[in-house]
Each structure stands twice: as C-alpha cells, then as structure tokens.
Amino acid sequence: MRSTAKAVGTAPGKVILFGEHAVVYGRPAIAVPVFEVQARAEVSLGEPGQGVILEARDLDLRYPLSSASADDALATIVWKTLARLEIPPQPDILISVQSTIPIARGLGSGAAVSTAIVRALARYFGKHLTSRAISDLVYEAEKLYHGTPSGVDNTVIAFGKPVYFVRGRTLEIFWVKTPFLLAIADTGIVSETKDVVADVRRRYEENLGRYEFLFDEIAEIAYQGRGAIEMGDLPRLGELMNRNHAVLQAIGVSCPELDRLAQAALEGGALGAKLSGAGRGGNLIALVTPETRGRVDLFLRLAGAKRIIITEVS
Ligand code: MEV
C-alpha cells in the first residue's frame, strides 16, 4: 500500500438554481458549484496502532473511527471510501476536516465535507477515483444527512461544474453562454433538509394531484432556465427564478424571512430571486449584474441577510 506523508482534498459548496424538491420526484434541477466557500480534509500519518482518528476542529470533535455509530455520516464516508480503495481496515491515519460552508443552509456542506474526505483519502493512498465514483460514494453518506436525497448535491459538488440533473439519468454538463453573478443571502435560519423533504413528502401523499402539477411546473421552469443560460438571456433567467420561487411558496417551503429577502433583492434591482435548497430558512439567491450587485447587497442586508456571498457562474 503506497501512502504519502500528508494529502489534502477540497470541495466547493453549491446552490440550486432551479428544481429543488421537484428533483426528488424525478424532475430536472440545475445546480452550480460555489467556490467562495470550501470544505477541506487533510489525511496524515497517525500514531502506530491507533487506527483511524477523525477530527473536526470547527465542531470541537476528535474520536476514533472504531467508536463511531452506524449513523455517523463522517464515519460512513470514511468506511465506504476505505472499502472502495481496498485499504485494509484501520490504517493508522488522522483525518482532519475543516469547512467554511455554513451548515444546514442549503449550500451542500455535508456533501462537500464528504467529497473532500474521499479526495484526501484517495490521494493519501495514491489511488485515482473519477468524479462519478466520488459522487456515488458521497451519495451513500448523503442518505444519512438527507434521508431520500435526489443525488443533485453530491453530483454538482463532485463534478464542480454547473449541472442539469435528473435522478437516475446520465449527467448533463451544459454551456453557460454569458457568465452571470448570483448574490447568495443567508437568512441565518438553520433548516434541516431531511425534515423539510419529509414534510413535502407528507403533503405530496395527501394531495398527489396538486403536487404532481406543481412539480411539473418546476420541471418546465428548469428546462426553460437551461435554455436561458445557454442563450445568455439573463432577464429571462431572472423571470424564471421569480416563477420558481412562487411555486416553492405554493409547495409550502418558503418562509417570511426568505420572502422578505426576495422582495428586497428585487427592489434593489436584481433580475430575479428565489430560495435555494430545501427552504424554510437557509439561503436566497438573487441574479445581479456588476452594476446592481452593490445596491442589491445593501437592500438584502437591510432586510436582514446575515451574510452575502457573490459568486460567478461560468
Ligand atoms: C437539497 O439541496 C435539495 C432538495 O431538492 C433535496 C434533494 O434534492 O435531495 C430539497
């Protein structure tokens, strides 16, 4: 077994541009990586006989893999990756994880941490894994974070490119004709994807016809959104974001704070705005230009945004 003294793996955050929730029910979603935030994992040689030690300094955690429970998502990704890389159990290594991606805000922090761990382990043991293999491994850990994940988070984060994603289908990476800017505004409200997805499932089962209709509406928006991105039609893209937000309100996953931020972004001059991710907190995304970004930023802050990241999609 070849190993280096130290290996690092990183992964970006993500936002969903179109299609959250509907994607769980087989409709398309568009997601883009966010490189302004990052998860980082470092694997180094541990003490002889200690086995695998997991460390997350941000969370004040340090524990041996052997003591982790079966529903520990960090441990799960390590177990699965070591098995995939055919490394004998319990090598003496320290896996240290850090992340600047806010947790439970729809930015894919769980998938990014898992991706960083897989990459660092593969590098440490001198093995190569394709983006597809990394994405598939991360999906296994996502099940612990999310319950019934569609797979969009692990896909966009492992590939690190804008994706048009339909569950169970071959991934499509598409062309962004005109790079554009998104302001990502944090409500500061923690929202657990697992809980919101489970609530949407309950509502769906109680009112199948209505929810199928709403998901179809989102599918159409995502399809047209891809066209707008490929054509570089930013006003149209903004309009579709507004429409997607309205359907997400109808589904019951927005909240007054997200609606307030959406309104403020539009008043500040954004071309469109919508919640991104599971909703009921987390982040709002707004389509801005170099001319409007400052004003939109100000309006969002005045409306209560706790943190704003501007990212370029290209
Ligand atoms: C979470 O980032 C997006 C959801 O659509 C859940 C999923 O796709 O698994 C809400």
Image: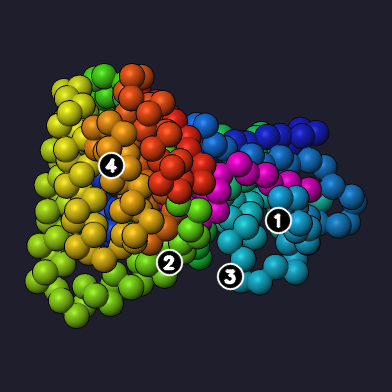
N-terminal of the two: label 3 or label 2? Answer: 3
- Pointer 1 and pointer 3: residues touching (CB < 8 Å)? no
Which residue is label 2 attached to? 194
Tell me if mark 4 has few (under 14), some (14-19) or many (20+) residues whose alpha carbon lies within 10 angstroms of its own: many
Which residue is label 4 attached to? 273
Which is closer to the viewer, label 3 or label 4? Answer: 4
N-terminal of the two: label 3 or label 4? Answer: 3
Q: Secondary structure at mark 2?
A: helix
Q: Which mark is residue 71?
A: 3
Who is closer to the viewer here, 185 or 267? 267
Which is closer to the viewer, label 4 or label 2? Answer: 4
- Pointer 1 and pointer 4: residues touching (CB < 8 Å)? no
- At horizontal 70% and vertical 68% (from top left) the residue drawn is 68
Q: Which quadrant of the figure contains the N terminus?
A: top right
N-terminal of the two: label 1 or label 3? Answer: 1
When the figure is inspected, residue 198 is found, relative to residue 89, above or below; the finding is: below
Give coordinates of residue 36: x percent, y percent: 52, 32
